[in-house]
Amino acid sequence: MKPYTVVLIIPTGIGATIGGYAGDALPVARAIAKSCDRLITHPNVLNGAQLYWPLPNAFYVEGFGLDQFAKGHWGLQSVHQNRVGLILDRAIEPDLRLRHLQVAEGCRATLGLNLTDYVVTDAPLDVELRSSASGASWGTIGNTGSLLRAAEALIQQAQAQAIAIVARFPDDLDRLALEKYRHGCGVDPLAGAEAVISHLIVRQFRIPAAHAPALSPLPLDPSISPKSAAEEIGYTFLPCVLVGLSRAPQFVTQPTHESIWTDQVDAVIIPESACGGSAILSFSQQKTVIIAVENNQTMMQVSPEPIGIKAIKVNSYIEALGLLVAHRAGISFESLNPSIFPLRCLSNVL
């Protein structure tokens, strides 16, 4: 029987009420993973700073790679283990750099991850943070060449198969925006810039990549939201990135016996107001069932209908799980309603 495959998308940096914080979409991913054979999702869903949850049937796919997969340009090839290379921004202070190296060593010794020697960029990456008029976050990198040279060294000299990047992010964040985020009612100010960093690596080298920001610890606040608490428990967000990359699928451009391609996806789940991204637009051209979750509100404010996407709207991820179970079982959604419209006779065709 064909494996039942689901894609879960929660775009980063747009203030999603579920998935807009550090790992708060992990419970959703865990539940969906139990309802399908293969779950394809991205770091924004699975990363929880120092917290993570191993999902044997989940595919950890960076956002640009997910876009290419949805377009049918790239396939996903599962792996037993990747050799993960680590890039550290030269702008990271010595003590903070040591903290991140100790995390990497801990992941080797405690989790058995296969890491290469690390590289420090030849110049500071010079990350700057921005926000759009809608409130979504984004950012820029001043020294993209330094980032790409570091990745190339890891690939060529250390045979890295996946790349983890730790860039020094500014500490002088918008205080009001940061406080709102820490208290569960704002947009992640770092997420947009993080996506730019990983996109560059994946686009250039076609290997898995993900980013963890380096920041000075924030002052203790007893009133923070449970949704942002995962970011408060240590010096680094690196553990979940290393774990995710250790089993991230490789990207392939030619089909193999075991590779997964976009036409094998059965269902895609997306926030109802976040349907403007490249991946969902591509999936909408397939025979894929698209499920739009209404109570996961975002700043994007792009619903399915205005852009011609045919989607089944549900109120919550719990309802989405019910649809997945019915769809996987081959049960018509209409048959689960209290009333069913009778069949109609089509006009005779000569």
Image (cartoon, rainbow, N blue to C red):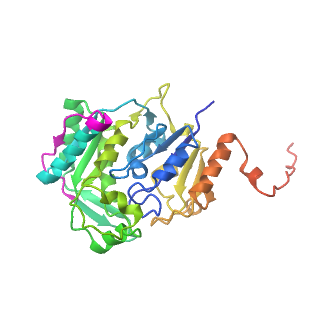
Q: Residue at x 76, y 56 (%)?
A: 337
Q: Residue at x 47, y 26 (%)?
A: 256
63 sits left or right of 311 in the view: left
Q: Quadrant of residue 53?
A: top left
- Confirm whether the magenta stretch covers residue 234: no
Q: Residue at x 62, y 47 (%)?
A: 324
Figure disc tally? 0
Residue 123 appears in view? yes
Quadrant containing the C terminus is top right
Instruction: From the top left corner, tell me how far across and down residue 78 is, in percent.
Output: 43, 32
Q: Residue at x 41, y 35 (%)?
A: 249
Quadrant containing the N terminus is top right
Q: 308 or 232, which is in the foreground? A: 232
122 sits left or right of 28 in the view: left
40 sits left or right of 250 in the view: right
Q: Which residues are magenta?
A: 108-127
Q: Quadrant of residue 154?
A: top left
Residue 124 appears in view? no
Q: 50 or 269, which is in the foreground? A: 50
Instruction: From the top left corner, tell me how far across and down residue 200 is, in percent.
Output: 29, 47
Instruction: From the top left corner, tell me how far across and down residue 161 is, in percent.
Output: 30, 33
Q: Main secondary structure of the magenta part?
A: loop
Check the image and report above or below for 62 versus 1.
below
Instruction: From the top left corner, tell me how far across and down residue 290 is, in percent.
Output: 59, 51
- Confirm whether the magenta stretch covers residue 118: yes
Q: 97 or 298, which is in the foreground? A: 97
Check the image and report above or below for 119 versus 227.
above
